[in-house]
Structures are given as structure tokens and as C-alpha cells.
Amino acid sequence: MSTPAPLISVRGVVNRFGSQVVHDGVSFEVLPGEVFGIVGGSGSGKSVLLRTMLGLRQPDAGTVEIEGRDITAMGDRELREVKRRYGVTFQHGALFTSLTVAENVTLPVAEALDLGEASLQKLLELRLRMVGLPLDASTKYPAQLSGGMVKRVALARALALDPVILFLDEPTAGLDPIAAASFDELVLYLRDTLGLTVVMVTHDLDTLARTCDRVAVLVDRKVIVDTLEGIVAHDHPWIRAYFHGERGRAIREAGEDHDGA
Amino acid sequence: MDSFVEFDRAVAVLRLAGDCGMEDAPVLARELERLSATAPTEVRIDLNGAGAIDIGPAWLLHESLARWRAAGVDIAIEGPVPAHFEYFADLVARDDGAMPESGRRSIVARLAEVGRRLEERWHGWYEALVFGGHLLVSASTAWRTLKRMRIPSVVRHMHETGVQAIPVVAVIAFLISVISAYIGAQQLQPFGAEIFTVDLVAIGVLRELGVLLTAIMVAGRTGSAYAAELGVMKLNDEVDALESMGMNPYEVLVLPRVVALVLVLPLLTIVADAMGLLGGALLTTYLLELPWQQFVMRLDSAVGETTLWAGLVKAPVFGLLIALTGTLRGLQVRESSRELGRLTTVAVVQSIFLVIFADAIFAIFFLEIDF
């Protein structure tokens, strides 16, 4: 099987805070059209890795390439172009609390493109429909929304410029299982119909089992990348504790399903 | 991307060529608008030369087509239909409601807005009343046991709002009294009455300027700090956390701040008064060449028994007003960071207003009782 050119490649990334080494030569590749999960214990540097991939943080060593272009060695102008290619949702939504849902979602478009009010409204309607939000939510303020809706608005905002890659930081954290499941389905639907590539940091084992094609586990300042079954079968003690603990049942069952098939 | 609109007899033709990404959306939107403006009866979309069309621009095209179709325009699409149209059919089939009407608001909506504002105002007064009640209750219970007065907290706030404010209050009082002494001396000299500059400075500083300037400085410094601190605590659910642990936020958060400011403002006023008199003394010594002994003698006769107290007695009242406004506004913050900014501003503006208003009432009162 020939592998397509990777969309993102992280090569030998080292991140240090003072004398504390968070990442010591982290390398992996994200292929187009896959849902790529990143897991790791608290303090293992998931967010730092995400920030590095977004070009918000300069790694102490190593490179990050997005669509074949090294973002660690480019100027602000080029980096801004690359940033147009991805959308990000943050853990707590990071919606602008002083703007309505409509203003939040249209902000990146209105900033980047010279579009009239009517077109902006049309595009707003599209993004709200894409993430399955009721259209009359557009006049509400973030404080008036439920947790699930906040995540959806954040996703709508991330989708506003038709990105190729979606970075999701803890997309289902704080959601009830039903809302989390429907968010997972939404992510898969968008991936399948639009061919988006999704990179998500998550602690939610159910989400991991349902959506991710491959998983990167951050342990001992390195990364272990494999398919979910491969990771589950890995004999690293931390990974065993993570997936085979009391809460890892869903994954195990998923693994057994695959074994049976 | 290239796009052309052509008019071939009565048929409008829109021809797209090349890839059409989100960055081409403005061009496409303009072309579509241009086409719509001609009110065509027949539209032909030529996509033979078109490459990949992103979701955003595809949607704009899709929506224009839907609008024309609804208006009874004949539509023909040549070439491959954009890949996302199928997805759009899925989207539109779901019932997501309708976009809320924007544009002009009806008179009823406007009236409703006025009503809402009015109710908010009224609710604000009600909240202030509730706030005052809670504070009174917790103050009256805290009075009995020293522990509940939270002395360490009071001392901390006294340090932050009082000790740390000494330099700025001292400098401001000094400068203002120098300025007023200078202007007074200039006006009084032609009449040979420059000795009365001492009276002007002494009475002005002790009765009004010292305490008023201190209060305004403190309102800006501490009123805003109180509102912002409590506001952020409110946004972080810290106030709820306190309450859930069985602690009374009025007793823990509000009372120490209020007590601290009521105690601190008179002390700061004394600093301001001293610096004000020093400024007056320096200016009269150097500008009017009045020996400082004479300044002291004149000061002694100018200042009555009540002059100092007329200023000082106002200080705790001003402190109370500033602390109450700041803490009340802080606790009113909910939902958003914009509220925090707005209420912090409101806290400062209102406390300065209240201080000046109270000062005016004091002035009338003192006049009546000949204080």
C-alpha cells in the first residue's frame, strides 16, 4: 500500500521549560483524511505539542511541517498563510464573550476577506448548519449557551475559512455522554463528507475509540504512534494503566471487536 | 480562480474556471450579485473549466441558485455539479429553524428594549438594597466575635488600599495646595492681602481639598480594584465555592474591604492634610517671602477648632461609599468579561459621583449648623 504524502510531519521536536524537558525528540506524521488522536497524562505536554504544531510556540529543536512547509522556519507573513489552512477549537471554547454567536463565527471571515453583509450572513448560516446548531442561536451570547453548544460554535468558528486541518483540544471534555457522542459523530461526518484531517487532543476514551484512526501517546517525553488496537496492546506500563484501567472498558471492548473481526 | 459573467441575449452565463477557494469567495459573491441585479430569466452556469470548489464559495453559489429557482428563473448547470451540493442537500433537509430577522426593528421591539432597560435599572436598585441588607446582617453578627471580623484580611486590605496609596496621595495633595496657594497669592497681592493666602490654603486643604482629593484618588485606585477582584472571583465561581463551604461571602469578601477602607481613608486624609499644609508653607515662604514662623502663627489664627474635623469627619463616609460601590458592582458581574469591564468603570464613576454629592450635602449641613 502506498502511503500518501503526510499533511503534517513533526520531526524530532524538543521542548524545554528551563531545565525541565517536556518533549525529547518527538516525531510523527499525520496523513490526509485521518482522525489523529493525541493522549498523554496530565503534564505530559499535550497542549505544548499542540501549540508547537499550531506555530504558536517555537520548539527548542526539530521541525514541524504542514503541507510540506516548515512552519518553524518561516516569517510571520508566511505563517499567517499557513494558519488560514487550519482551524482550531480550544478546550473551553475560547469564544469571545463580548460577541454574539454570529459575530464569533463571522469574525475570521470578515477579517480575512472583503465580503458584503449578505454573503457573510449566508456563510454564517452554512457554518451553523454544518455543526448542527439551531439558526436562531446566532443572536445569543456565549454565556447563554450550553457546554455542547459552546463547543459547536467553536467548531463553526474553526470551520469558517474552509480549513484543511482541524485541531481540536479536548473537544468533548465537560460534555454529557450524549452530547459527546453527537459531537464525535459530527467530527466523523465532516471528515467523511469534506475530507478534513482532524488532530485531536483528548482524554475521553470513548471519543478515542469512536473517532480516531491512529493515536499518538506521549510517554517519557517521547511519542508512541500506532492504531488504537496496536496502542492498546502495547506493553508500556503507563499505556497499560491508561487503557486497561477501570475506565478503559470501552476501548478494550472496541479492541476485542477488532480482534474478533 | 477566474469567473466571468456574460450576457448572451436574454441568457445570463456565469463561467467559473480553475479552483475556487475561500479566498475567491469575495469575487464570486460580487459576480453573483451582479448577475442577480440584472433580474435574469434564464441562467446558465458553466462549470466545465472549474476545478475544486470549496464549501464556502459552493454554498454561496448554491444559495443564489436556490433564490433564483424560487423566483422562477430557468437554471441550467453545464459540467460537473460541485461535489458539496449533495452535502448541502443533507444540510438543508435537516430542520435547523430559520435565521433570525435582522435589519430594522419594529416599534414594539424598541419599546420592549426600553422596558427591559427600565427593569434592569429597577433590578439594580433592588440588588443594591439586598446587598445593603446582607452586609448589615453580617456586620451585626460579626461585631460580636472578633474572629468573624477577619482581622488579617482587614489588615491586608488596609495595607493595599492605605499604606500603598500614601505616596500618590501625598504628592497630589502637595501639588494641589501649591497650585491653589500660588493662584491665591497672585490674586491677593494687589490688595496687599497676601497674608490671607495662608487662610486660603489652610482652610481649603483642611476642610475640602485634602479629603476630597484623597477620596477621588482612592475611588480610582481601590474602587476599581474591589470591583475587578470580586468580579473575577464571581466569574471563576469562587463566590459560589465560598458559599458552598458554608461561608458568607458578605462576611468574608465584602465586610473586610468595607471596614478597611472606612478605617484607612481618614488616615490617608491626615497625610494629605499634612502634605497640603507643607506645600502651602513652602510656597508662601518662597514666593511671598514670609518667614515660616509667621506662617505658623497665621495658621493658628486662621484655623478654628472645627476646621480640621470638618474635613476629617467626612473621610469615613467617603470610604464607606467607595467601598460599597466597588464591592456591589463587583458582585454584580456575571457571564462575561465585558460585564467585568463595564461594571469596573461604573464602580469608579459612581463612587466619584457619590463622593462629590455627599461632599455637597456635608457643605450645606455644616453651613446650617455653623460647624
Image (cartoon, coloured by chain):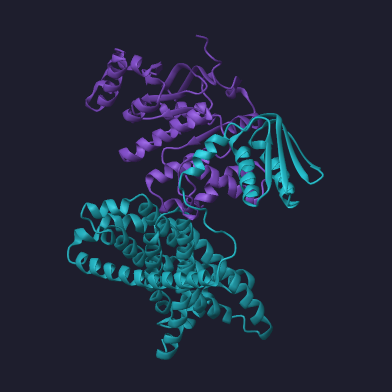
Residue B125, percent across and down? 38, 72
Residue B195 falls left or right of residue A256: right
Q: Nearer the viewer, residue B334 or B59?
A: B59
Report how many numbered discs are placed on residues in the image: 0
Q: Residue furthest left?
A: B145
Image quadrant in which you'd find residue A18? top left
Measured along the vertical axis of the image, is residue A151 above or below residue A12? below
Residue B196, percent across and down? 57, 82
Q: Colour of chain B?
A: cyan
Q: Nearer the viewer, residue B182 or B253?
A: B253
Q: Residue furthest top?
A: A1
Q: Which chain is purple?
A: A
Residue A93 in view, yes or no: no
Image quadrant in which you'd find residue B129? bottom left
Residue A167, percent across and down? 48, 31
- In the image, what residue occupies the spot 50% across and 73% down? B111
Residue B370 falls left or right of residue A105: left
